[in-house]
């Protein structure tokens, strides 16, 4: 029996991973999991408890208590949730507590998962791995426009600084840092709109599946 198809989509914040991963999942008929939401929901739980997201005991307890309905919260986006998610994500006990959920999700029917460590840690054997990047300026502008669309105007400079700080923290942590898997295909979306990025990603996926077919 062949294992269900798992596609790993990793990369820094606001590189376009989520949009691409969602489109790939829809086109391939696979479930989709935004794993950043798990860390966001843990961060929110810690903030709700009045604790510090950098406190390992509080963050690990929040990760163990996570419930599916926590992922439906409407306050998982925006600067406070971004910072809390990145802080709890650096704590090894939090990552360990979330690992089985991610693996079970992918193994059940196959899936497209996006995050930071899907191709390196969660599914190191995934046959298709994309590492999606874009220039810091392009990513900051996209995130800034997205925030303005929601009525939040933090200023482009502030958005760029927040993204850079979060990526630096995600890449510098000791456990499961943000980095491309050795066998990931690097995918730069700086000069691509959503349709062009999706078409190019589908070509990559088809190519990878053909070369990895038995
Ligand atoms: O993808 P996102 O921006 O929603 O992720 C929020 C934070 O969660 C991000 O700063 C780092 C962390 N994260 C992680 O460490 N590992 C993942 N697989 C997904 C997200």
Image (cartoon, rainbow, N blue to C red):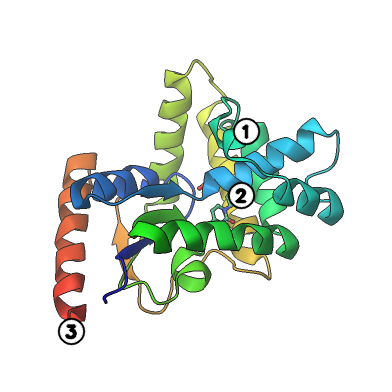
What residue is shown at x 27% (from left), y 77% (from top)?
Answer: 1
Q: Quadrant of residue 10?
A: bottom left
The location of residue 9, given as percent across then percent down, is 38, 58
- In the picture, the disc for residue 79 is 1
Mark 3 highlights which residue? 214
The location of residue 191, given as percent across then percent down, is 25, 48
Towards the viewer: 12 or 162: 12
Report if the beta carbon of the residue with label 1 is closer than 8 angstroms to ligand 1. no
The location of residue 36, given as percent across then percent down, is 53, 47
Kindly report the distance in space between the C-alpha atoms of the residues bearing marks 2 and 3. Answer: 40 Å
The location of residue 87, given as percent across then percent down, is 71, 50
The C terminus sits in image quarter: bottom left
Kindly state the secondary structure of the residue where label 2 is placed.
helix
Is residue 4 depicted above or below 16 in this figure? below
* Residue 191 visible in rendering: no
Kindly report the distance in space between the C-alpha atoms of the residues bearing marks 2 and 1. Answer: 10 Å
- In the picture, the disc for residue 49 is none
Kindly state the secondary structure of the residue where label 1 is placed.
helix
Is residue 119 depicted above or below 17 in this figure? below
What residue is shown at x 30% (from left), y 61% (from top)?
Answer: 187
Q: Mark 3: few, some, or many residues within 10 Å (few <14, many ≥20)?
A: few
Report if the beta carbon of the residue with label 2 is closer than 8 angstroms to ligand 1. yes
Is residue 98 depicted above or below 1 in this figure? above
Q: Mark 2: few, some, or many residues within 10 Å (few <14, many ≥20)?
A: some
Query: Reading the chain from its start, which is encountered first: label 2 or label 3?
Result: 2
Mark 2 highlights which residue? 166
């Amino acid at each position: 029996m062949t294992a269900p198809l798992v596609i790993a989509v990793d990369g820094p914040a606001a590189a376009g991973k989520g949009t691409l991963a969602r489109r790939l999942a829809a086109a391939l008929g696979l479930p989709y999991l935004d794993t950043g939401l798990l860390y966001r929901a843990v961060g929110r739980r810690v903030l709700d408890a009045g604790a510090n997201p950098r406190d390992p005991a509080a963050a690990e307890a929040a990760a163990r208590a996570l419930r599916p309905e926590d992922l439906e919260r409407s306050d998982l986006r925006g600067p406070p949730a971004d910072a809390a998610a990145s802080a709890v994500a650096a704590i090894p006990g939090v990552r360990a507590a979330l690992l089985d959920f991610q693996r079970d999700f992918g193994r059940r029917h196959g899936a497209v998962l996006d995050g930071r460590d899907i191709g390196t840690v969660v599914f190191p054997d995934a046959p298709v791995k994309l590492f999606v990047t874009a220039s810091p300026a392009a990513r900051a502008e996209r995130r800034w426009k997205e925030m303005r669309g929601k009525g939040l105007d933090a200023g482009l400079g502030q958005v760029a600084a927040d993204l850079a700080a979060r990526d630096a923290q995600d890449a510098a942590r000791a456990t499961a840092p943000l980095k491309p898997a050795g066998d990931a295909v690097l995918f730069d979306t700086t000069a691509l709109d959503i349709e062009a990025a999706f078409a190019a990603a589908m070509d990559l996926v088809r190519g990878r599946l053909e070369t990895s077919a038995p």
